[in-house]
Amino acid sequence: MLLAVAALLVVGSPSPAQAHARPVGTYPADNEVVPEAPNELSVTFNEPVTLAAAGNQVLGPDGAEVASDFSVRDRVLSISLEEALPDGTHVVTWRVTSSDSHPVAGAWTFAVGAPSAHAPAVPVVTEQHDVRLAQAIATGVQYAGLLGLAGLVGVATLLAPVAVRRDAVLVRRWHRTAGGFAVLAALGSTLLAPLSALRTRGEPLAAWWSADTWSEAVRGASATTAAVVVVGVLVTVVALRRGLDVLAAASAATALAAMVLVGHTRSSGPAAVVLGADLVHLGAAALWWGGLVALGLALAPGTGLRPAARAVLVARFSGAAAVSVLGLVAAGLVLYWQVAHSVSGLWDTGYGRTVLLKVALVLPVVALAGWNRYRLLPRLGTGPREDPAGAEGRLRTVVRCEAGVLVAVVAATGVLVNLTPPARSATEPPPPAAERTVTVDVGDGLSADVTLAPGRPGVNGVRLRVTDPNGRPVELDGPPTLTLLQPEREVGPLRRPVTPSASGTWEATADLPVAGTWEVTLAVPLSRFEEPVAIGRIEVQ
């Protein structure tokens, strides 16, 4: 019930589809009018993306689809046109998957020759709310199972004293609970594969059984995570029942670590810092949630444990939990800042508000844990303040309360990992615009200035100016030919059409997807029979 209620946060209000990746430029630019029909279109993103199986098309002025081929390389979505575009307004819709496994979609328009009187409408891309809800619930189930299993195994194999591990009743309880956690982990992880495919394709839950959905599901990162989780939890349960403690702990840790294969940390950096913080966060959360369940089973009536043995288990878990709180706080701060990079985003976005909800839920759990450690734990020992029977009863009550609140925390986590962090563009100002100019020798005393503005990755304006030795503009026999190449990243050559803007000056638009040193090749038609070629290098930062 708590999982379903918390997951409703996802569909509280309609919003356009979005993800951590975002476009930083298109060619042609949005609403641009180009004099001649381009042979290729492109969208450049701020991070590497993969092409979605549906949602990519080019629409002509009459609304009919134009034959085209969409492909992705690194951060650039390229669209090769298989037929010449007619004059008028065209609409391009695209859908890709960011490196954090979240879909992102959009559209832009441009015109050839002149805008159409009645242009086709740009479609509004919205996510399917039933899929988002199901994905949030499945994620909550996955987290509840994986964190619970890993934490319980950690207590059973590492923290519990020998006297506790020898109690047959408690061991059976732990084994049955571990099996239940394993089922939840495997079920949630398996369901996430087709649900992620549905969300990527922008299709409703009704398309669950389609062949295209499952074809994409088995190729996605969620399928890899599911495979690792299912094998890991199966090995964990079998090893735990056979007393293979080291194998059980190792396989549980492996299944838990598979969670970093998908999610926001896949698109954040530095990779070592973010992934390391993610693993610490997962490990600390597992110890707290699964360990608390293991402790509750040990405190429940019906076992043969002596009060002293319970006191040792509680003391060990309490100390480990205190360390885990520090790990949760430190790793959580690192993760939020590296993923979101925004303080105002904590209250301005759904992602930030869900983070605050988690913090609000965790605070009373920390308070209850402190009460356990400093008020109840001393009464479980053998000193003058001991009150084993009364203290154990109160401790059981507090542990149940802690576990109940942690279920809500897990539910909020299921929602959080399927939300979009605040866009960094809203909090990080782009580098200041700076024109980049290179001067190349054309020959016969002539030179050409090639200027890029703003000189950053993405869409740039290009200005060409050919001058004589006295700095006067030179009239050319026709438009020069401009080609750009980034050899280190193997981008290009990109040939850009130029248009005259003033005497001796020509302009173009170039979408440069990566930073670095670009080679500029300029063929300058001085006459019908003379067209020297000059090459220069220009920095894009």
Image (tube, helix red, strand yellow):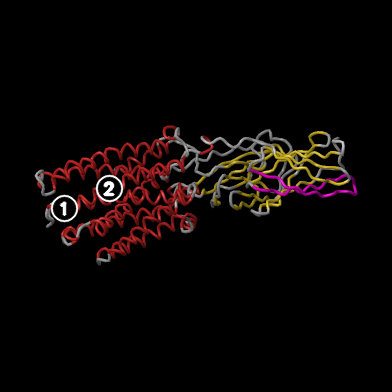
Residue 498 visible within the image: yes
In screen coordinates, is 353 left or right of 301?
Answer: right
* Mark 1 crowd level (few <14, some 14–19, many ≥20, 10 Å Cα): many
Residue at mark 1: 310
Q: Residue drawn at (37%, 45%), measured in percent from left and top? A: 414
Q: Residue drawn at (82%, 40%), measured in percent from left and top? A: 466
In screen coordinates, is 244 left or right of 77?
Answer: left
Which quarter of the rendered picture does the C terminus lie within?
top right
Q: Are marks 2 and 1 in contact (CB under 8 Å)?
A: no
Closer to the chain start, of discs 2 and 1, is 1
Residue 215 x %, y %: 49, 58
Indicate the secondary structure of the residue bearing disc 1.
helix
Residue 420 visible within the image: no
The outermost residue toward the front is 383
Q: Amino acid at mark 1?
A: Arg
Residue 370 x %, y %: 23, 41
Which quarter of the rendered picture does the N terminus lie within?
top left
Residue 427 x %, y %: 51, 35
Q: Nearer the viewer, residue 34 or 247?
A: 247
Instruction: Answer whether residue 328 is magenta in the image.
Output: no
Q: Amino acid at mark 2?
A: Ala
214 w.r.t. 132: above or below: below
Q: Nearer the viewer, residue 222 or 191?
A: 222
Numbered-mark total: 2
Alpha-carbon span between mark 2 and mark 1: 16 Å
Q: Which mark is residue 194?
A: none
Indicate the secondary structure of the residue bearing disc 2.
helix
Residue at mark 2: 321
- State the extent of the magenta-drawn residues as a range: 516-541
Residue 36 x %, y %: 75, 42
